[in-house]
Image (cartoon, helix red, strand yellow):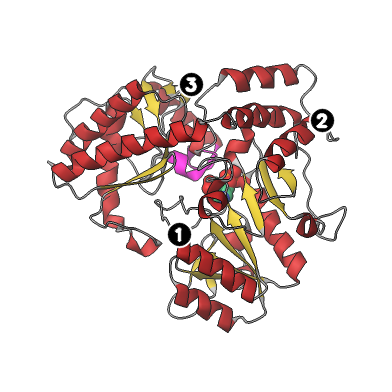
Amino acid sequence: VNTGSKPDISREKSAELYEKAKNYFPGGVNSPVRAFKSVYGTPLFIQKGDGCFVWDADGNQFIDFCGSWGPLILGHNNAKVREKVTEVMQNGMSFGAPTALENELAELIIKNNKFVEKIRFTSSGTEAVMSAIRLARGYTGRDKIIKFEGCYHGHSDSLLVKAGSGLVTFGETSSAGVPKSFAQETIVIPLNDTKALEGAFEQFKDQVAAVIIEGIPANNGLLMQDVEYVQFLQKICNDNKALLIFDEVITGFRLGFEGAAGHYGIKPDIVTYGKIIGGGLPVGMYGASAEIMGHISPDGGVYQAGTLSGNPVAMAAGIAQLTELLRSGFYKELNTKTTEFADSIQRFATARNYKFKVFQIGSIFWLAFTEKEKIQCAEDIDPASMEKFKVMHRELLNRGIYLGPSGYEVGFVSASHTKIELEKAKRAIFDSLDVVFR
Ligand code: PLP
């Protein structure tokens, strides 16, 4: 159905590939959101990326704001990353033994980031967070964890848990296949609610191993928390001898080299990273003080391992990417252009009285169909507003702009988006908003 003012782009080749993919993969995809279930049409099959652009199988070109869901802070196919990866690949691709490249990436991270003294590399964000939870449990000798409704931490069993009904703070599984007994170890409470947090600690006194929060929750809209709330969170953890875990898989090296912890000036007990540290290759990581990390095997009793952990090719991509991020002024430039981008979209929407807000921090932005000035917890998002996003998503594709295919997802600006593309994207967003609200 094309209700917009532009004809739909040709998607024949992508549609053909999707039909084929459905024979091989559940839903035709290897990660559910890619299936375009929340927007019009079927998934675009991407053939190529360069800088801020991607091209699909039908040859359509898009300015990309998904950035592979966050890792590509320098843009697609960055020359420095590609050259380093190509160089390292000449020596082989995996050894399952230590390499100097692991030291090099670790040094880049630890020397420039006061929140971690020792780290362990994994192959995904999910693994990093799953391991951080195990470490917190092993370290404290307690089983329960507290997570927040609206935060996503990957797909490990303990974290596929949503808020239960009524006053019961035990979670309910949010996926088939997660045992109820696992969910009972995860307490789920709303964000930005000090009473709920106090209540959970009272109800489960001396049982909570850790509280886990996304540095800035960015998986269910962009739910920015006030610094006072995060300070409260840290204090209540300290008072109860529970660990505070910042899941910085999105925010790490995105908001700045020290992520959300640096932004808030709060030292979490354990931090998890992913996405950006792999430069587009599969890398995750968790880190903490040397004392806490001393509990990881082989030094300590918390087991955690990985065939491809610290893979040399992935390390090379991370080294090349993080080296660029350390360039003086990198974040200032990136964050300033994103602020200007977000502000001018907001000015346009406000001038036309559209019920639309752009929430933004650093180079992360979220386009929300709402009148609310602040959205700080999952409940504040009106699911009905997603219908408007759906229309906007199609209008944007038709105008050469690629956003993640769900209104709950944030967008990312990369260093490769120049003023020219941001200007084009803005105009496309203005026109699309006019269609949505006409
Ligand atoms: N934690 C956060 C905050 C994430 O955004 C994600 C993925 O989007 C994960 C963990 C899981 O990472 P991965 O998809 O690499 O397993």
Let me know if residue 247 is in the magenta part. no
The residue under label 1 is which amino acid type? Gly
Q: Residue at x 71, y 73 (%)?
A: 142
Quarter where residue 77 is shown: top right
Name the residue carrying label 1.
150
Mark 2 against mark 1, which lies toward the viewer? 2
Can I make out residue 63 in this image? Answer: yes
The answer to which of 402 and 417 lies nearer the viewer is 417
Q: Secondary structure at mark 2?
A: helix
Q: Residues within 10 Å of mark 1 (few under 14, many from 20)?
A: many
The residue under label 2 is which amino acid type? Ala
Can you give x and y, in whole percent of width and height, for residue 104 in the image?
75, 32
Magenta stretch, residue numbers = 25-35
Let me know if residue 29 is in the magenta part. yes
Q: Examine the rendered structure and indicate whether residue 328 appears above or below residue 136.
A: above
The answer to which of 28 and 33 lies nearer the viewer is 33
Can I make out residue 173 in this image? Answer: no
Q: How many marks?
A: 3
Q: Secondary structure at mark 1?
A: loop
**Looking at the magenta stretch, what is its main secondary structure?**
helix
Q: Earlier in the sequence, mark 2 or mark 1?
A: 2
Name the residue carrying label 3.
47
Measure the alpha-carbon separation of dots 2 and 1: 39 Å
Measure the alpha-carbon separation of dots 3 and 2: 33 Å
The residue under label 3 is which amino acid type? Gln
Q: Earlier in the sequence, mark 3 or mark 2?
A: 3
Measure the alpha-carbon separation of dots 1 and 3: 32 Å
Q: Residue at x 52, y 35 (%)?
A: 23
Can you give x and y, in whole percent of width and height, for residue 306 in the image?
77, 44
Q: Residue at x 70, y 36 (%)?
A: 108
Name the residue carrying label 2.
100
